[in-house]
Amino acid sequence: MIDKVDLKNFSLDQLVDYVRELGLPSFRAGQLFSWIYRPGITGFEQMTDIAMELRQDLAGQAVFSRFESLLREKSRDGTVKYGFRLNDGLLIESVLIPDDDRHTLCLSSQAGCAMGCVFCLTATMGLRRNLSPAEIVNQVGAVRDEMLKQDQGGITNLVFMGMGEPLANFNNLVTAISILTEQRGLDFSDRRITVSTCGLAPKIRELGLKTKVNLAVSLHSVRDEVRSRLMPINKTYGVDELLAACRDFPMPRRKRIMFEYIMLDGINDSDQDARLLADKLKDIRCKINLLPYNQTKELPYRRSPAQRIERFQKILWQAGYTVLVRTSRGSDISAACGQLAGKQQD
Ligand code: SAH
């Protein structure tokens, strides 16, 4: 069982290679691919357009995984946090955020995180390991199936804003995106997928070349000394280098880069911070999302007062930016930004 190949780790192209190695014609790959992502399909025996003997052969060497057990916690505001137990016992989380006409699923790319951002609870776990492509796409499959059962409509948007730094698990991320956007896979438009990064500048460029998904950047300050204190990655790729990578990001189908900016009381929320931010982003097609910091008792940081956030927003507005203040969702079940730490109750 352990050494069987999980077909869900393959992009369609990789699956073509795999079936060829088995001496099968390449059209089998497309057939298999469209079966394994379909709701309710759990075994090769259900693949009625494949001869029995071949199905048995395949079952002898391959599996297609799915998340079996699913933990579920619902917030007062409708946000749902899902917990998935991985084969090695680790727990990862995804968050479904329903809105009027949207159902956004927030995905994890790693168990834990190595980036060490001082304000984030996931960082306190450290990095346990990267998620495989199968473990990334199975979050989507499991939540989709559950929504189907409850007749809740489908997932409309995917954001890589859960646990982990997606660009630090680059190859698996790119494979997962190719499965998510493949028509015979999970069939999401790349315009409905957003990858958020703490700022791995060279990987931002690579993401721009290898996919067409939207980019979000966790910025939080444009002063190197402040940003380096908050986000250790800034010591490797400073603000100017990060923004240069953003300027190079190809944008035809992706409308704008989203800059996320947590509002931390007394740290990055002054009028001067706002003006400096406006100045630094001048020539980048972008929108700015201000995130009132979600406080946790484990960490000492405080959310900026509402008036401060309003004033900050106003300065950016006056400089011509689109600026939203993101309303926090799911904080009563520790599902809000920066609160995912795999501590869900069994
Ligand atoms: N590693 C990626 C993906 C995680 S996205 C990234 O850094 O972009 C999670 C977002 O929530 C990031 O913008 C992160 O900076 C932010 N965040 C972390 N802790 C938070 C908190 N306590 N309150 C609000 N936002 C937080």
Image: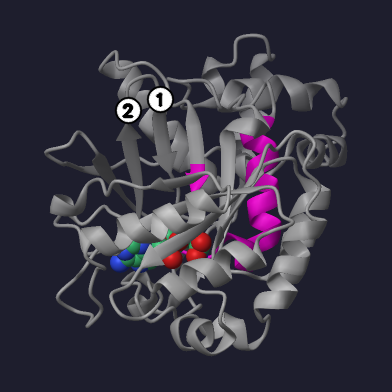
**Would you identify the image quadrant in which residue 345 lies?**
bottom left
Say what secondary structure mark 1 lies in.
loop
The residue at the far front in this view is 318
Any part of residue 162 in sight? no
Residue of label 1? 102
Residue 79 in picture, x, y percent from top left: 24, 38
The amino acid type of the residue labelled 2 equals Asp
Q: Is residue 177 magenta?
A: yes
303 horizontally vs 107: left or right: left
Q: Is mark 1 within 8 Å of ligand 1?
A: no
Part of the protein shown in magenta = 159-181
On screen, residue 15 above or below 120: above
The residue at the far top in this view is 49
Q: Tell me which residue sits at (22%, 58%) in the image.
A: 306
| 343 or 247: nearer the viewer | 247
How crowded is the residue under tag 1: few (<14 C-alpha within 10 Å), some, or many (20+)? few
If the image is split into quadrants, where does the C terminus sit?
Answer: bottom left
The amino acid type of the residue labelled 1 equals Arg
Residue 238 in picture, x, y percent from top left: 66, 81
Q: Is mark 2 within 8 Å of ligand 1?
A: no
